[in-house]
Image (cartoon, coloured by chain):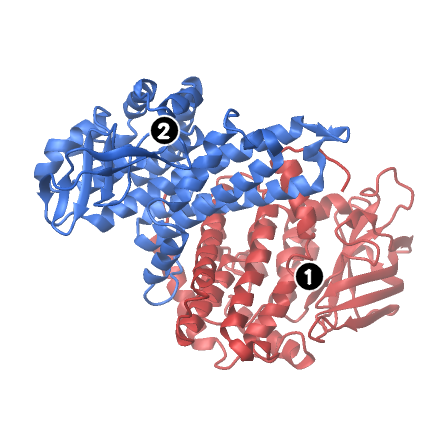
Chain colours: A red, B blue
Amino acid sequence: MDLDFTPGQEAFRAEARAWLRAHVPASPLPSLETEEGFAAHRVWEAQLAADRWSVVSWPEEYGGRGVDLVRWLVFEEEYYAAGAPGRVGQNGINLLAPTLFDHGTREQRARVLPEMATGEVVWAQAWSEPEAGSDLASLTSRAVRTDGGWLLSGQKTWSSRAAFADRAFGLFRSEPDTPRPQQGLTYLMFDLRAPGVTVRPIGRLDGRPAFAELFLDEVFVPDEDVIGEPGQGWRVAMSTAGNERGLTLRSPGRFLAAADRLLNLWREQGSSEALRDRVADAVIGARAYQLFTYANASRFLDGESIGPESSLNKVFWSEYDIALHETALELLGEDGELADTDWAEGYVFSLAGPIYAGTNEIQRDIIAERLLGLPKGRR
Amino acid sequence: MRFLLDPEQRAFADSLNAMLTAADTPSAVRSWSRGEHARGRALWRRVAGAGVFALAVPEAYEGLGLRPIELAVAFVELGRHAVPGPLVETVAAAALLTEPGLAKRLLPALASGEALATAAPAGSYALDGDVATTRLSWDGDGLRLAPGPDGPVRASLDPARRLTRLLPGGELLTAEPPLAHALTWARLATAAQALGVGLALLDRTVEYVGQRTQFGVPIGSFQAVKHQLADAKIALEFARPLVLGAALTMTEADVAAAKVTACEAAYRTARTALQLHGAIGYTAEYDLSLWLTKARALRGTWGGPGECRAAVLDGLSGGARRS
């Protein structure tokens, strides 16, 4: 057991740090939930990709560096410590790409991944529907067979990044009458600008269109945009949901950097005695999450899989994120009410954490039933 | 970077767990609480025989070398089984006795389990001062070998923890004892012990709510019950890497972070365990009480939550470290 990085890992850290120091924009980009900010973040993604920093864990042929999870964690620590912009491509990179690596065809990977890596194509996720949130299996939007492909109809909602993104991925019901709701679903990629697609941006709490509703009216999708076998979409989606995603959905680097900024803010504001314990808890929480992730990465590299344990991560970071930002807003005093600060933007973003990617109530059920072995019951 | 216990470390934990499971620790705890020490001493010899105290003693003094990770692993198991006695204090004493003359004279008996030590600042409560055979206290002059307990044993909220003050004076052992170093070892051992206490409380409560029925179903099928236990599980699982990480770095800040987090997680689990057991959990005769009361006591000893949080912030000079 050790926390020592190899000389090669240290060299990788130094290389990432030097590149970031030379390239991170001196002043923050506009919010990525605005049209202007979205465009600016796309330019940043292209800049990252030009020197192969946008997807370091991917194979080189798709624009990555082929590094393992430990180096990925190191990169993320340096990335956020450098104050680099949020990642506009994260839906594609964290959710779609792992699925393509596991279930996509070679052709799909060659076609989709390079332009995802450069930010040329930004992906929105299209999981939720008006009647299907955490109970994803209850979704009703349809995929109907047609010549050379499928016709998608129905409604998706809470589709993150869809207000400005190019394409989306999600599950559609391709067989209407199956014994279980998880059956007969197909995993498809589609173009947000295709005929039949209407995108209605939804303002989140601060009014910015961080997500959208999608209305689909016989939208044609060619066969080559089906991932895995038709009808097997649930299995395809779930097989990559728990495993590596449990490690990569939110990296510790982001919280280590946020805790660092909070600590600096606390000191700048006179080291308030009243908030001392909460600042300490933020620092401790970031360290706990870092070490927890290191342990999981070690297990993963040993060949173990990480399934329901990813629910522990999800509840932890989502609640931690809110607590950290609430502490920052209190430290700011009356300025904590202002909407145009990084802390306010982070706070608004953090409020969604316990809601998306499976609500924390559902995550706690998973922990209780699948990790602690408690009996299933009525919700 | 490989942040996982090695197979030998896991095997060490498993063997301690098996040994303590077979030893019927609850009855040893109960007799210890009454001031009858024979069974507890027998248990102590077995714990020492497994090498636990030798993990805080250099090889030159008949120990196994300073091995904080293995010590932490062992103390999780001691907590899991509510082993009574001045366990942490014996580790703290070993860490105080670094000067070669003192080490040669006093450490071999601590490593072998022949001696039980207690350690406390002059004027503070020392754990099990009536039964400890090596009593260390420190004042403005330095570290002293206290001549004996002062006054009657005071009851702790945890009946298995027997508090005494130590008589002032006694032989001056050294003018400059390594107090910060000893505090770090004591806090690490306490953090690990608290984690073990929390894990035991969670295990027992999960088992109970799976069996206890109300309204015709196991209460563990109720979401309100599940969510409390899920929160306890999250708190403990995030305390664990802090304890092991602190054992690797042994910095004051990391150890203080582990201490406050593990103790808060254990205490939170204790509150949940009591709530979900209902009235049976509120009785002294039911064994759950052995862990419930210890979770509260460990929270305050060797630096309470506020003190540890302050130590975390004091230990960070230029912002939080990244690796």
Q: Is residue A275 left or right of residue A87?
A: left
- Image coordinates of residue B143 in percent, x first then y, are 14, 44
Q: Secondary structure at mark 2?
A: loop
Q: Residue at x 49, y 45 (%)?
A: B265
Measuring 41% from the left and 23% from the top, which residue is drawn there?
B30
Q: Secondary structure at mark 1?
A: helix
Q: Chain of mark 2?
A: B
| Image point (75%, 59%), residue name | A169
Q: Residue B192 falls in which quadrant of the image?
A: top left
What subunit carries mark 1? A
Q: Name the residue type under label 1.
A: Arg
For marks 1 and 2, give the CA distance.
65 Å
Q: Is residue B310 visible?
A: yes
Tell me the tag on residue A111.
Answer: 1
Q: Is residue A8 above or below residue A365?
A: below
Judge whether residue A114 can be spotted in this image. no
Q: Residues within 10 Å of mark 2 (few under 14, many from 20)?
A: many
Which circle marks residue B84 in the picture? 2
**Amino acid at dot 2:** Pro
**Quarter of the image that includes the C terminus of chain B:** bottom left
